[in-house]
Image (cartoon, coloured by chain):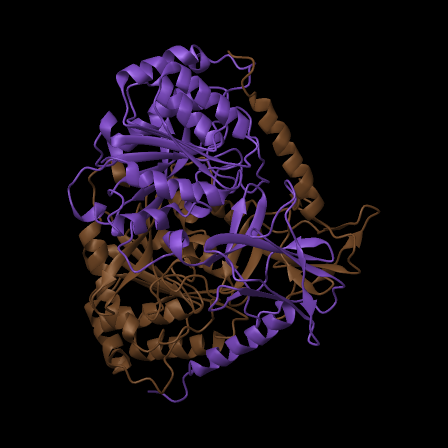
Chain colours: A purple, B brown
């Protein structure tokens, strides 16, 4: 080899300089979080000029909607640290407050967006939390693509999980339609919900049938998640206009047609499930009732139950009558999950009373905690094994 | 409707409380950045307790590897702001320094990861930067999936772009293999590189042929991008071991076999291109030379040219002989892009001298600037229209 030619060692040296430089700018040499053998976790952040640094993590008790915090301690190098007690297995989000300024952990590039907020994530493994990890199992594929909705007269973005082996055989698969909550979009279940990991792991364990999971965008005024559509980068908001006025339910057949035309699908009631969280539970309730012979499996996760009394869209007419029709047509599973401290708890009680009065059978799962992703991941993990058996 | 049942208005009120709460925690009511009519941009951040806040953006002149900064000004509400001069059309990254602490903009959830750093992004539209936007054009699909590499004896993650219409016809397509740099992975081109947007837009404009773009992971010791594989969440590093020792080049036929077995591909030299940036340019150089009758189109973007003189893998033997063989076999395009201030500039000069001495034809494109994504997006946008004509 020509000795005069550039040796790649030069690049390595340059890269070390870049990193030395970066460390001046962001404490990049710090490793945070560090999960210890006993599942205690140490968080660290380099902020030598700060007067006060706090950590807020999802494992801490919150006061209402106000996250808990704990003070971190500074060492002589300006690094603030805190070590938790051993944590229960879970996927947790966390952030720092540096002199009151909320920020992510600069040593941890793993970040999730929830509506307009970004937070770091970590997984303390074990038990149900192992379902959220990428394990040494066959992996399905996750595709972001676009479909046309004639009813809404626009192209819309959608996320599709196909199970391991889908591409290499000719079988047809059942389908779970999985709907997000207010402020969410077609990215919510695949990021915060860890849907691909949960599905891969449950399928590998033989606890779930291989199935296609369809994660559409339930905000009819959006083409796509913020940042993924023609509006470009704009600040996501919690309540997107027209998400709960009946138009999504009315347009849902466009999604099913797209899926059934484009994937090898068992296009029949016995092989269709629909579930959603919060607003997505509302959508799942109304879609399954309005198309009352379409889904054999319905899942309402911390569902927002009924529409604003002012909305008058056709899909909200005759709720009792369409529920009765759904009951008469028959279904395999009507699954309701709710957390004990969910602010929607009472409306869930009332909805179950309604179902009781109608004589509609359902399975009820009450969990600890409230209106949080940690419950929705658990509900998904428990619901999916019950499907298509 | 039963008036006693929960009205969804309650949820909306709760959500407003959540947001009021969030604004206490992170200045969520601020809109930042704001791009004005004249392409000046205002950045704002709520940090009432900070003594000094700086903005660092990619449009600012850097000193070597040290990003430029500018001081922001505080108002009576503790909001720090800075308005730029009108900016040239471009996708820019930026971050804040709050009392020296590097952080992202809490009002902007659009974030990209580059190795272990995260930064906000914004797009100032116009000219070439419009290629980086999601426009009202047909969109291709982006799939993250896994393939088996018998040579490396592991399953590996890969990102695949299929062009608009791929799913709804039966045509075969040409393929561009697009390789990332050191510290990158199968996420790099699709996130920082805006590959899906560039492809959608060039295809819609009739400037590029519809093609499949394959974005593999070039770090043979990794199964997947950090956070996406069985190692879980760990801090990404710039130089991953064994990325430049010949094993990636040796295993590359596994990727091509996977693509040609799983996609409707024109599996012939005239319909194969390979390109990469930095380390990916190194890989593209060696793969195209070692398999000298496989690719009709080769793109070296700010390429790291030659291996460390200590590596002795078979694929690095007889570089001149295999280049000659590649030349004799013929190719349509050997495209080299380099920035004037790239630290690899001199090695590029030497490599072009080598090609000149061998009599190998190439197209040389010299741009302003250095070893940065902004150049690689431009190179991709210029290279792709030259393919498969």
**B251 over B347 or under it: above or below:** above
Could you tell me residue B198's position as x and y percent? Answer: 43, 48
Q: Residue at x 48, y 75 (%)?
A: B344
Q: Nearer the viewer, residue A292 or A368?
A: A368
Q: Residue at x 29, y 53 (%)?
A: A139
Q: Nearer the viewer, residue A383 or A121?
A: A383
Q: Quadrant of residue A333?
A: top left
Could you tell me residue B229's position as x and y percent? Answer: 37, 60
Q: Which quadrant of the figure contains the N terminus of chain A?
A: bottom left
On screen, residue B81 versus residue A155, left or right, reads right
**B76 over B245 or under it: above or below:** above
Specify the farthest residue to the right.
B76
Could you tell me residue B211's position as x and y percent? Answer: 30, 48
Q: Quadrant of residue B312?
A: bottom left
Q: Residue at x 73, y 54 (%)?
A: A100
Q: How many marks?
A: 0
Could you tell me residue A52's position as x and y percent? Answer: 74, 61
On screen, residue A182 versus residue B351, left or right, reads right
Q: Residue at x 33, y 64 (%)?
A: B223
Specify the farthest residue to the bottom.
A3
Q: Which quadrant of the figure contains the C terminus of chain A?
A: top left
Residue A183 appears anywhere in the view: yes
On screen, residue A275 versus residue B64, left or right, reads left
Specify the farthest residue to the left.
A170
**B84 over B156 or under it: above or below:** above
Q: Quadrant of residue B97?
A: bottom right
Q: Nearer the viewer, residue B224 or B196?
A: B224
């Amino acid at each position: 080899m020509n000795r005069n030619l550039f040796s790649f060692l030069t690049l390595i040296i340059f890269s070390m300089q870049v990193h030395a430089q970066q460390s001046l700018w962001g404490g990049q040499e710090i490793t945070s979080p560090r999960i210890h053998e006993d599942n205690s976790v140490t968080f660290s952040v380099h902020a030598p000029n700060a007067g006060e640094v706090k950590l807020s993590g999802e494992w801490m008790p919150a006061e209402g909607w106000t996250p808990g915090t704990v003070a971190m301690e500074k060492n002589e190098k300006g690094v603030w640290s805190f070590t938790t007690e051993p944590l229960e297995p879970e996927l947790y989000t966390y952030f720092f407050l540096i002199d009151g300024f909320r920020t992510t952990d600069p040593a941890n590039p793993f970040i999730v967006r929830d509506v307009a907020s970004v937070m770091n994530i970590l997984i303390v493994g074990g038990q149900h939390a192992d379902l959220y990890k990428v394990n040494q199992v066959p992996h399905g594929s996750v595709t972001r693509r676009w479909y046309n909705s004639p009813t809404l007269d626009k192209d819309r973005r959608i996320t599709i999980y196909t199970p391991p082996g889908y591409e290499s055989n000719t079988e047809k698969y059942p389908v779970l339609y999985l709907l997000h909550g207010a402020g969410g979009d077609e990215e919510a279940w695949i990021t915060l919900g860890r849907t691909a990991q949960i599905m891969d792991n449950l399928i590998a364990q033989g606890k779930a049938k291989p199935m296609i999971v369809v994660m559409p965008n339930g905000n009819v005024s959006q083409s796509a998640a913020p940042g993924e559509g023609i509006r470009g980068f704009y600040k996501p908001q919690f309540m997107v206009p027209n998400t709960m006025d009946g138009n999504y339910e009315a347009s849902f057949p466009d999604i099913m047609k797209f899926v059934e035309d484009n994937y090898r699908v068992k296009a029949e009631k016995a092989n269709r499930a629909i579930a959603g969280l919060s607003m997505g539970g509302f959508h799942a309730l109304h879609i399954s009732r309005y198309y009352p012979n379409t889904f054999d499996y319905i899942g309402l996760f911390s569902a927002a139950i009924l529409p604003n009394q002012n909305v008058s869209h056709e899909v909200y007419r005759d709720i009792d009558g369409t529920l009765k029709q759904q009951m008469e047509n028959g279904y395999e599973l009507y699954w309701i999950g709710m957390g004990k401290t969910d602010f929607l708890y009472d409306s869930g009680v009332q909805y179950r009373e309604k179902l009781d009065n109608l004589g509609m059978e359902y399975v009820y799962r009450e969990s600890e905690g409230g209106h949080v992703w940690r419950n929705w991941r658990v509900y998904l993990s428990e619901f999916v094994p019950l499907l298509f058996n």
